[in-house]
Image: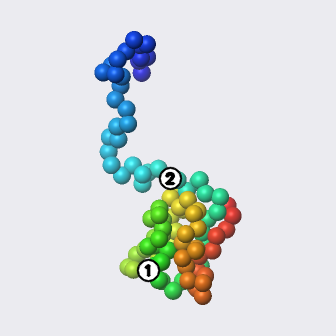
Amino acid sequence: MSKIKSDACWQDLPDGGIIPEGATSAEFKTGDWRSEKPIWHEDRCIQCLQCWINCPDSSILVAEQKMTGIDYDHCKGCGICASVCPPKANAITMESE
């Protein structure tokens, strides 16, 4: 990479902020940011999918209209899934990392 001269004008600056391709967020694993993680108790789950609807990170895994697990590579541990899980089911609980 070449150094930028002190007398350079804006046209001489290298292009920045360029995203060469889409869907790079799928490759950027953000799950290690969390201090708590949700634990899914499959035997208690009533498959209401409130966790899936409300997850801001799309970390609730669903197949054939049923929850199948949690994507810990992208889950940031916000706890929304646990808070919207019906209290009688209590299928998602938060645990310290």
Quadrant location of residue 81? Answer: bottom right
Viewer can see residue 68: no
Q: Which mark is residue 31?
A: none
Q: Residue at x 43, y 16 (%)?
A: 3
- Label 1, label 2: how many angstroms apart (C-alpha)? 24 Å
Check the picture and name the quadrant holding the N terminus: top left
Of 2 and 78, nearer the camera is 78
Measured as percent of width and height from the top left, residue 16 is found at: 37, 32
Q: Residue at x 39, y 11 (%)?
A: 7
Image-based side of 64 in relation to 80, left or right: left
Label 2: few (<14), some (14–19) or many (≥20) C-alpha neighbours in 10 Å: few
Measured as percent of width and height from the top left, residue 65 is found at: 39, 80
Viewer can see residue 92: yes
Check the picture and name the quadrant holding the C terminus: bottom right
- Residue reaching furthest to the right: 96
Label 1: few (<14), some (14–19) or many (≥20) C-alpha neighbours in 10 Å: some
Q: What amino acid type is highlighted by mark number 2?
A: Lys
Q: Residue at x 47, y 62 (%)?
A: 57
Quadrant location of residue 10? Answer: top left
Measured as percent of width and height from the top left, residue 91 is found at: 58, 80
Q: What amino acid type is highlighted by mark number 1?
A: Lys
Q: Which mark is residue 29?
A: 2
SS under mark 1: strand
Q: How is the image coloured?
A: rainbow
SS under mark 2: loop
Image-based side of 12 in relation to 46, left or right: left
Residue 18 against residue 13 in the figure, above or below: below
Measured as percent of width and height from the top left, residue 72 is found at: 54, 62
Q: Residue at x 58, y 67 (%)?
A: 79
Image-based side of 53 in relation to 33, left or right: left
Residue indicated by mark 1: 66
